[in-house]
Amino acid sequence: MQGLLQKVRFHCEHIMHIKKQNCSASGSILNLTKHPKGLNGSRPETGLHNTTVAEVLSTKGQGKAGSWLWCRTDDTVYDAVKQMAHNNIGSLVVLKPGEQHHIAGILTERDYLRKVIVKDRSSLYTKVGEIMTNQDKLVTVTSDTNILHAMQLMTENQIRHAPVIDGKIVGMISIVDVVRAVVEQQHEELKRLNEFIRGDYY
């Protein structure tokens, strides 16, 4: 995961270096990410330092409450893993019986592999609450967390999934979601820079 973070940072730094070189050559420094209006009068650009977890959730379709996938502590691991496989995801929010918004923990592929498969336990008879990562051990973010900070938190703590908590659970992000958002944003930056170099803005 550290290698992945280093590659993304190198990619960001490389694009920023190109921007500085070409803006200096033009005789004026144009801030493509903080200009109050786009260069051609279009909507303001955001940039990585203004991109939040909320935007990642919106892209994933988790912009409205309850759109994230979950299971309960008393569900069997078999049913939970089946749900993960069916939806092609690597984690589930775990709720206590009767709860709708406050989490008890999360269940990840890593929990399943380490606590069921490796220990030769039966997923049919093991409850999610027995193997989940408990709430007090979770690394969480909020909707307002910057995606670069979220990526740093996940990398430093060697985790791939983080619940998004705004007083209550509002979603779940993965390291893949965050890296994809960073790369897509940088591609947009590069596209705008190429248009500027070609003179498309004049």
Image (cartoon, rainbow, N blue to C red):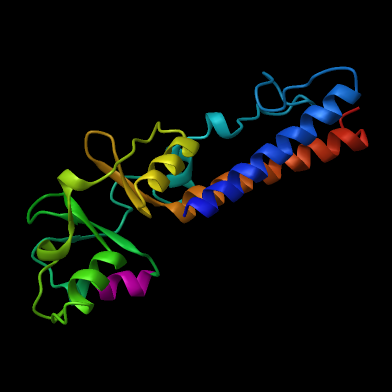
* Residue 10 spot, x, y in % from top left: 64, 44
Q: Is residue 101 visible?
A: no
Q: Nearer the viewer, residue 74 or 117?
A: 117
Q: Which residues are magenta?
A: 81-87
Instruction: Identify the residue shown where x is 39% and y is 41%.
Output: 153
Instruction: Identify the residue shown where x is 67% and y is 28%.
Output: 43
Q: Is residue 80 visible?
A: yes
Q: Nearer the viewer, residue 120 or 59?
A: 120
Residue 101 sits inside the magenta stretch: no
Q: With respect to residue 155, does 130 lie above or below?
A: below
**Apparent side of residue 151 relative to residue 165 in the rendered image (left or right):** right
* Residue 115 spot, x, y in % from top left: 18, 70
Give the overall secondary structure of the magenta segment: helix
Q: With respect to residue 13, does 100 lie above or below?
A: below
Instruction: Identify the residue shown where x is 75% and y is 33%.
Output: 17
**Apparent side of residue 187 relative to residue 197 in the rendered image (left or right):** left
Q: With respect to residue 178, does 27 lie above or below?
A: above
